[in-house]
Image (tube, helix red, strand yellow):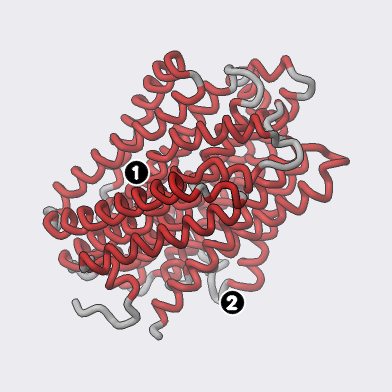
């Protein structure tokens, strides 16, 4: 088996572990605090620094990979990563200090309703401050992970992120009696520091930095001009989520928490499939750009979109069909009640579109970053933020909290449509005939799968067996129907994906 295939398998496994650990974190928080005002204050306030963290962590990593390839070809990759790591550490310290100092003012301005709850404002202020302090290490972590991705050691990035999540969970479990919900952001800060130390001391090669090298600020400036549109684009989804939370914070106790629980659960396919496939194709696209291989670049995008759709279509359709028992199994315990399950299930249905479109967007975005055309997608991203604010305002008035979730799906559709058509134009076009052919086959297989599941529900009533047997039986039958139809239709995407043979180009 090739080294790339081994790396892909390790990435998928490590991503599954990361999402499993993230689910445990959400289970712990929901079990301890349910949809109380304490959970509201934590979830709403953490979205602000989390936007900066995502901006740095994913944005820097995505900008660094093609930049590293470019300098590595010239024999200057070692020097380049030294410049970027040193400068990023300085910038991260500045951002962390500014964010921490501003945290009380941000809460007073953005979340005035939290002052009506005991300790509500304090929880929000400390959450923002502690998350901003972690930014000191987040930026450098991103460059390290970008280096490992460039070396096709994809699993190291997800492994280091898993450490952060697990330490957060550990602190929440061990210290919730003494510190309450403050234990969650404290755990995140400690986990980020440990993740950095692990990479610095154990994983990173000994000769990784030229410690005596002075920072080449001209080179750094050129890198950051490339990074800024990438980072802003990466943060668009999180910015839109923060806008949702701002509107939700004024809708009463429990709305923020239930919207968050719904979004976190249904975004698991996006986090697993979207991130995995986009990560896998990125080095291929970067290599194609470095070698001026336009055909390889186009095939990479086409293949990434087709495989993404292959994985997303049945998964999201199945989640729509089984959302209530899934949420009941995942969350309903401790402080999370049956009424919270009903509300979270309803919100999750409206969020489904956002998962699909932002997953597709993850592949499209890699094309822009590879071509160093991040400013195109940044403009579209900024436009989507404006559209999101307007649609949040209008739909919240018409539909209430459900309107906020629906807004995310509508904005995701607009965003992915505009970015795909733009990439199509600047890259010289893709094989639309191939894409439409595969989309049609996957759509037929998904439709037949859903029809079979509806028939089973109507005639057999598997819900009487309990939630877990119901989900398992539907998943197995639905998966077999979906795969069987694709085999009959001879879907090249499906057959190539399950084949262990090297695909002939």
Furthest-front residue in this view: 459
- Residue ID at (39%, 48%): 455
Tell me: residue 459, above or below residue 156. above
Quarter residue 133 falls in:
top right
- Residue ID at (61%, 40%): 96
Q: Nearer the viewer, residue 184 or 132?
A: 184
Q: Position of residue 152 (x, y in %)?
A: 43, 72
Helix, strand or loop at disc 1?
A: helix
Residue denoted by label 2: 206
Characterize the local packing of mark 1: few (<14), some (14-19) or many (20 or more) Cα atoms within 10 angstroms: many
Q: Nearer the viewer, residue 499 or 185?
A: 499
Residue 357 badge: 1
Tell me: residue 359, above or below residue 95. below
Tell me: residue 378, above or below residue 455. above
User: What's the CA distance linking mark 2 and mark 1?
Assistant: 41 Å
> Quadrant of the image for the C terminus?
bottom left
Quarter residue 501 falls in:
bottom left
């Amino acid at each position: 088996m090739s080294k790339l295939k081994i790396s892909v398998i390790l990435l998928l496994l490590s991503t599954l572990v990361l999402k499993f650990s993230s689910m445990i974190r959400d289970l712990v928080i929901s079990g301890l605090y349910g949809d109380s005002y304490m959970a509201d204050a934590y979830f709403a306030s953490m979205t602000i620094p989390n936007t900066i963290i995502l901006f740095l962590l994913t944005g820097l990593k995505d900008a660094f990979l093609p930049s590293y390839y470019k300098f590595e070809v010239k024999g200057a990759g070692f020097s380049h990563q030294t410049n970027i790591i040193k400068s990023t550490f300085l910038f991260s310290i500045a951002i962390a200090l500014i964010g921490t100092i501003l945290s009380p003012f941000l809460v007073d301005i953005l979340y005035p309703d939290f002052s009506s709850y005991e300790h509500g404002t304090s929880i929000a202020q400390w959450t923002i401050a502690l998350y901003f302090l972690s930014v000191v290490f987040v930026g450098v972590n991103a460059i390290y992970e970008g280096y490992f991705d460039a070396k096709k050691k994809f699993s190291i990035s997800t492994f280091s992120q898993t450490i952060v999540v697990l330490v957060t969970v550990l602190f929440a479990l061990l210290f919730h009696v003494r510190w309450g919900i403050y234990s969650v952001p404290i755990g995140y800060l400690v986990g980020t520091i440990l993740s950095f130390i692990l990479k610095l001391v154990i994983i990173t090669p000994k000769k990784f930095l030229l410690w005596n090298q002075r920072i080449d600020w001209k080179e750094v400036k050129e890198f950051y001009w490339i990074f800024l549109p990438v980072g802003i684009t990466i943060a668009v989804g999180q910015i839109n989520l923060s806008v949702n939370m701002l509107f939700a914070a004024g809708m009463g106790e429990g709305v923020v928490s239930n919207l968050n629980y719904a979004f976190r659960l249904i975004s698991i396919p996006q986090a697993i499939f979207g991130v995995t496939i986009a990560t896998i194709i990125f080095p291929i696209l970067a290599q194609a750009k470095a070698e001026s291989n336009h055909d390889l670049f186009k095939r990479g995008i086409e293949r990434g979109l087709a495989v993404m759709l292959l994985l997303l279509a049945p998964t999201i359709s199945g989640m729509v069909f089984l959302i209530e028992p899934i949420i009941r199994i995942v969350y309903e315990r401790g402080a999370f009640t049956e009424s919270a399950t009903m509300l979270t299930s309803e919100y999750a249905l409206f969020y489904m579109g956002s998962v699909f479109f932002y997953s597709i967007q993850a592949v499209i975005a890699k094309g822009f970053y590879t071509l160093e055309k991040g400013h195109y997608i940044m403009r579209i991203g900024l436009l989507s933020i404006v559209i999101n604010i307007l649609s949040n305002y209008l739909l919240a008035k018409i539909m209430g909290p459900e309107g906020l979730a629906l807004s995310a799906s509508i904005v995701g559709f607009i965003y992915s449509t505009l970015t795909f058509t733009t990439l199509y134009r600047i890259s010289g076009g893709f094989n639309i005939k191939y894409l439409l052919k595969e989309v049609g086959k996957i759509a037929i297989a998904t439709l037949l799968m859903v029809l079979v599941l509806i028939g089973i529900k109507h005639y057999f009533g598997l819900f009487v067996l309990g939630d877990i047997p119901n989900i398992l039986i539907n998943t197995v039958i639905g998966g077999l129907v979906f795969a069987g139809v694709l085999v009959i239709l001879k879907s090249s995407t499906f057959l190539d994906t399950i084949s262990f043979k090297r695909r002939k180009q």
